[in-house]
Image: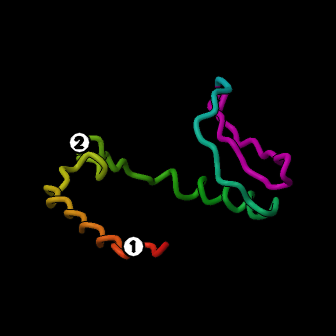
Amino acid sequence: MTGKFVLIRSSNGKFHFNLQAGNGEIIATSQQYETRASAEKGIESVRANAAGAVLDDQTEQTPKSAAPKPAASKPAVPKPAPPRSQTAAKA
């Protein structure tokens, strides 16, 4: 059996599609679209662009979140609080 696109209307009224493999496993899910026509255009875009898509293997690159961070500068020393007024209360 070949794969298929399954068009779905979500509970929020928006549309999205799943690409299912021949065994029924979902192998891709689209973004949500405001209209059915937009979702159908998304399906056509995947059909047109995926056939010639190349693999951009980024598994050997260092993720930005794992890049070394620059050395932290010394923390700022807090300024001492100004002295309280020493005015004595008159009795």
User: Residue drawn at (15%, 61%), measured in percent from left and top?
Assistant: 73
Q: Nearer the viewer, residue 23 or 64?
A: 64
Residue 88's label in the rendered image is 1
Q: Quadrant of residue 25?
A: top right
Q: Is residue 58 left or right of residue 44?
A: left
Disc 2 element = loop
Q: Is residue 18 above or below residue 21?
A: below
User: Residue drawn at (14%, 59%), measured in percent from left and top?
Assistant: 74
Give the magenta-colored segment's residue range: 1-22
Query: Residue 31 location in percent, x, y?
Result: 65, 54
Q: Which residue occupies the extreme top position in the image?
A: 23
Q: Is residue 54 left or right of residue 80?
A: right
Tell me the crowding category of disc 1: few under 14, some 14 to 19, or many 20 or more residues within 10 angstroms, Cα based: few
Disc 1 element = loop
User: Residue drawn at (58%, 35%), measured in percent from left and top?
Assistant: 27
Residue 20, magenta (yes or no): yes
Residue bearing mark 2: 60
Query: Residue 5 location in percent, x, y?
Result: 71, 43
User: Residue drawn at (74%, 58%), measured in percent from left and top?
Assistant: 40
Q: Is residue 67 left or right of residue 6?
A: left
Looking at the rendered structure, the kind of residue marked 1 is Ala
Tell how many labels: 2
Q: Nearer the viewer, residue 59 or 18?
A: 59
Real-space CA distance between mark 1 and mark 2, rounded to the nearest whole angstrom: 72 Å
User: Reading the chain from its start, which is encountered first: label 1 or label 2?
Assistant: 2
Looking at the rendered structure, the kind of residue marked 2 is Glu
Q: Nearer the viewer, residue 26 or 14?
A: 14
